[in-house]
Image: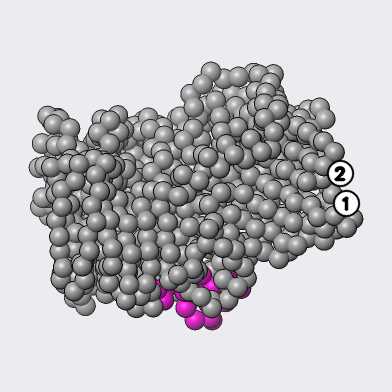
Amino acid sequence: MDLLLSWPRPAADWTEALPVGNGRLGAMVFGGAGRTRVQVNDATVWSGTPHGPAAALKDIAAGPAQLAEVRDAVSAQDFRRAEDLLMGFEGPYSQEFLPYVDLWLTLPEGISHGRTLNLDSGVVTERLTIGGHDVERTTWVSRPAQVLCVAVTSADVGVDITTPLREVWRDGLDLGIEIPVDGAPRHEPQVEEPLRYGTADGYDPFAAVAVRVARDRTRTLIVLAGSTSAQDAWTGDRPRTRGEHRRRAAVLAEQAVAAGADALRRAHEADLRPLLGASSLTIGDRRGGTHDAAELLSGKDERLMATVLFQYGRYLLASASRPGAPPANLQGIWNDDPRPAWSSNYTVNINTQMNYWAAETTGLGECHLPLFELLGKLAVTGRDVARELYGARGWVTHHNTDPWGWALPVGMGHGNPSWAIWPMGGAWLVQHAWDHYDFTRDHAFLVSTAWPLLRGCAEFCLDWLVERDGYLDTCPSTSPENLFLSPAGTKESLTYSSTMDVSLIRAVFERSLAAAEALGVDDPLCAEIAAALPRLRPLPVLPDGRLGEWAEDLPEEDPLHRHLSHLVAVYPLGGIGLPTPGGLAAAAERALDRRGPGAMGWSWAWKIALRARLGDGETARSLLREASRPFTGDRHHDAPVDGSEWGGLLPNLFSTHPPFQIDGNLGFPAGIAELLVQSHSGTIVLLPALPAAWPDGELRGLRCRGGVTVDLTWRDGEPDVVRLERIGGDPAEPVPVRFRCAAAEVRLAVGESTVLKGLGC
């Protein structure tokens, strides 16, 4: 049975509307009789221009000589001078993800009997009674047809379209829209023209929308298609004229209408169902059927909620990130605010990465590919930034980016270095390219994408390191986004070799060498990496047994800080954790204990994954229960930090910071998967952190490193049936499997599977 979520009433506001999408077009469905809204986004509708990053770099006067002064000031602990000098490295801001259009549908007044969202088919269904007749309205976004579809079992439907952007022409239900060439984030209120229209660098920021309606005596089909200048820029196509955009949108809409609702839906489901069905999870014995969202939020059935959060996160990623369009941003593909929080951009000191943590493990590797398209752009723009700002080889990315490839530090000369001056964005993002190879063992991807990205990032890291006390250190260094207290009691961010810096660079070096070995590459850079690797500073363990956040024992300004930057080596990098207790794993656990339980959506998701990696299923379960409570409002300053009044789930089950950020939703499946199967160490570990409250369950199609999938049924907390299949990699490479004291090892050809039984202790 399909898994459906239900709501008894139409949406009263945006956080009650239901999301649909095809990776490029996204929509929020409100429902209801009378006049109802379908709010539409296009993943390519961002402010800015293709040449914006290069133009901004020309305005930065700082460079390698000033960097040397910064390093001297940090070494002398002259923090004010170091910060003043670093302000010269900050550019303006990355661009904003913007709303596109609103499709308005009008039916006669009637009664809505509720809405459902099918998490296996990607279709929203609403049943109404109008004039004594039953009416059904279904909404989906087709990837094969590249259109939004609304099918209504009534001929009495009015249709209109509006845009929150600048409308430049209208012809019936067709619109021409101008997109801003610059968009300032809400946290830069001093910008006089926060959304600036016009042209820049010869780029015409234009979008066309076409709506077509087909009716017969009993049914109406409405389809919406679009075409944008930014789409051409993203794919590298020849820039189209405004007339060509108008024709392309019209042709897509007319072809879809000609196909008809039934054919459109069949093609849509044929595309989406196999992707969503690549893996599944049932904790307990309930998955399929229709489940009331409000009942889920009541917390009465935590196992069902965990099951739903696993599939809902997968559904959202499959709807927001498909090849040919930009990757999922802070809000995935759904935003109705022309000034969204944090520009709804790519924040790459945790949030963008978390969006993709579940991509490989849960069978959504295809959805990972847009992120590598963005990395390809950053490897170009970031090379110029590395050279001009730091005199370094390779490529660099900082705290924020956008589809244009923004690689500069942001901050406008007043951004706190704790987040703005952080040149490790590329070093974290590039781990995803290695992960895609490690899970798939796709040799062609390693050649074309992962190795070039890793190599360029390793070049930058080598040149960023400086000699200090016999080690190679990073300087200046921050630990996003926490501060420490200086001996004088001031709040500071700048030091050397933060734990996060060292962890990321070590992983870049190790994975670059592994990639070169897998390819049989004889590259002189590998000798440089091999010489630098043992000279990186060891991760610090403080006198109280905690893994330190900085190279020295510096007191945190906020011991309960939402970021867990110093634990990146635990998860997602996986270098610390099971199967070896003690040592750095114990130190990491103590550091995590100090951070405490309560958080907001994405921080909860990270804490869940960290606890799972460390084998602490009971704490992970407690955190998941916190994270899945209904959001009740902003946390008061005097409220306990237990998650009860800060973050949680909105009525449509979107995770909130607040405000809504999709990273929490997309991080939950990764954390849940980590509780059930791990494969970081070369061994597939079954049920490494299973909570006692989840004694029975079944998962299918979970991916493991080395090119192996696992189907697992467990009963009374132990594996019952384990099925392994090799989908890639080397058939000669053994597949070790472990559950507590029991172990097995098999060899499988690609396409071959085997079943293990009796693996309990």
Which one is nearer the viewer's eye here, 14 or 754? 754
Q: Is residue 205 magenta?
A: no
Residue appearing at x 36%, y 52% in the figure? 701
Above or below, comparing residue 652 to residue 395 in the picture: below
* Mark nearer the N terminus (2 vs 1): 1
Q: Which residue is mark 2?
A: 156
Residue appearing at x 22%, y 60% in the figure? 756
From mark 2 to mark 1, how far is it between C-alphas? 8 Å
Residue appearing at x 53%, y 76% in the figure? 299
Above or below, comparing residue 175 to residue 461 in the picture: above
Q: What secondary structure is marked by label 2?
A: loop
**How far across and down, in percent of the image, does residue 687 sit?**
28, 67
Span colored in magenta: 621-644
Q: Is residue 404 visible?
A: no
**How far across and down, in percent of the image, does residue 8 sit?**
71, 65
**How far across and down, in percent of the image, does residue 92 sit?**
51, 42
Residue type beneath disc 2? Asp
Residue type beneath disc 1? Pro
Q: Is residue 27 left or right of residue 627?
A: right
- Colour theme: one colour
User: What secondary structure do most residues of the magenta stretch adopt?
Assistant: loop
Above or below, comparing residue 36 to residue 384 in the picture: below
Residues at discs 2 and 1 in contact (Cβ within 8 Å): yes
Q: What secondary structure is marked by label 1?
A: loop
Q: Is residue 623 magenta?
A: yes
Q: Is residue 556 visible?
A: yes
Which one is nearer the viewer's eye here, 445 or 341? 445
Q: Which residue is mark 1?
A: 108
Residue appearing at x 82%, y 42% in the figure? 218
